Image: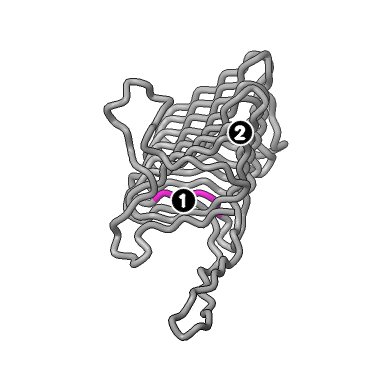
Amino acid sequence: IVRLVADSDSDQAGKIGDAETGNADPTANANAIDVTVTTLAARAADGIYVQETDALTIDLTGAISVSQVDFRSTVTTVTDAALSDLTTTDAGPIKLVAGGTLTVNEGDADDTGVSAASSGNILLDARGTSSDLVLNADVESGTGHVTLLAGRTADSNADVSTTGGTVLVSSGSLLDMASAATISSGGGNIRLNAGNESDVLLGSLNAGAGAVSVLAERDILDNNAATLNVS
């Protein structure tokens, strides 16, 4: 379990990892924080850049305590409160790459698992042919772009939203939106793509004044019964 907090004094300055804009490879970032953990929660103002070596779950960390050794020959317990979600508060992007299945859970009561403020972009990338992307909590950006990539199945049981940014969801196999799941862009374009002779199961897509593109190497199917699939 890892709890990462930059900008711990809440003065809207601080990031976890950093961009690597001079890198010619768009899939790599040597400045990201590299981890091998099971559970992660993180909060920063100006950005979160993390690369996990295998499977990872975004969830509640629980409180984390250590014993501070005192000069008087005693110890004092120092505790950091439980933290959930990946959150930026000052237009910082959230970029998370995992070398295995990436699961976003709802660890607290706000229904959201990943939230980038203002124009912060979001990348969730589960790499590898056996890696799934599983959303059990909402993913939201204020006005930024949202990209969700799965090496195998993209399984959306929650909502994805931005206002004016674009949304891209791409899977190496089945792209499965639950019946109540929505993707809304507030006027930005939306693109869904399922590869490897697989289906797209549609919940609800709402692009407003934007355009929608859905591609499947097999079928595009209605997964929400009487509710509109695209609007």
| Residue 127 figure quarter | top right
Q: Amino acid at mark 2?
A: Asn
Q: Position of residue 155 (x, y in %)?
A: 65, 35
Q: Give the amino acid type for the residue marked by disc 1 in the picture.
A: Ser
The x, y position of residue 23, in whole percent, is: 31, 25
Q: State how far apart marks 2 and 1 are (Cα).
A: 24 Å
The image position of residue 3, as x and y in percent, is: 51, 57
Verify whether residue 115 appears in magenta.
yes
Residue 203 visible in the current orientation: no
Q: Which residue is mark 2?
A: 229
| Label 1: which secondary element | strand
Q: Which residues are magenta?
A: 112-116
Of the pair 5 and 71, the residue shown nearer to us = 71
Q: Is residue 26 left or right of residue 179?
A: left
Could you say which disc has been placed on residue 115 in the image? 1
Above or below, 116 against 19 in this view is below
Nearer-the-camera pick, 178 or 230? 178
Q: Which-is-in-front pick, marks 2 and 1?
A: 1
Residue at 32 percent of width and 50 percent of height: 46
Position of 188 with respect to 177 (left or right) is left
Asked if disc 2 and disc 1 are in contact, CB closer than 8 Å, the reply is: no
Of mark 2 and mark 1, the one earlier in the sequence is 1
- As for residue 26 lying within the magenta part, the answer is no
- Depth check, front residue: 188 or 167: 167
Q: How many residues crowd mark 2 within 10 Å: few (<14), some (14–19), many (20+)?
A: some
**Residue depicted at 29% across the width and 64% down the height:** 11
Helix, strand or loop: magenta stretch: strand
